[in-house]
Amino acid sequence: MIFLTYFIDYCRIKMATRGNKTENAVPLIWSCGLWVASSAAYAFFLELQTYVLHIDKHLNSIALGFVAFEFVLSLLAIRVFWKAYHY
């Protein structure tokens, strides 16, 4: 499960980077789609695992906060890029 989360996060960050560098909304939309899987994985590691250490809870809470913040910034960038492209 941890390797799947790593792969999803790697793809999500790559798509967001490509979208920001090219100022294209489509890779950012894909990145937001991968956000759902990434945040679900962090939520699983946070609450649904059988045995979770306190450090795991803290680190996954921080990771979930960063992913949520990146999602909000991606939505703002999508809005800006979409307006610039369509006007």
Image (tube, grey):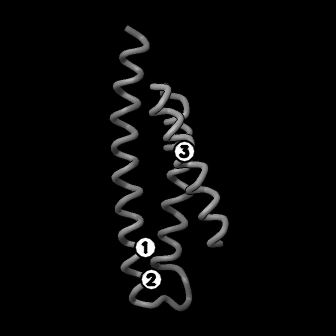
Where is mark 3, residue-wise? 33
Q: Quadrant of the C terminus?
A: top left
Label 2, label 3: how far apart the Cα atoms are: 25 Å
Say which amino acid is labelled 1.
Asn
The residue lying at 51 percent from left, 36 percent from top is 29
Q: Residue furthest front?
A: 21
The residue lying at 65 percent from left, 72 percent from top is 1
Query: In front here: 9 or 22?
Result: 22
Residue 38: x and y in percent read 53, 59
User: Could you tell whether 54 is left or right of 11 in the image?
Assistant: left
Residue 60 has which mark? 1
The residue lying at 36 percent from left, 79 percent from top is 58
Q: Given contact means CB atoms under 8 Å apart, are the residues at marks 1 and 2 in contact?
A: yes
Q: Sequence-wise, which precedes: disc 2 or disc 3? A: 3
Residue 56 has which mark? 2
Residue 39 to residue 81: above or below: below
Say which amino acid is labelled 3.
Gly
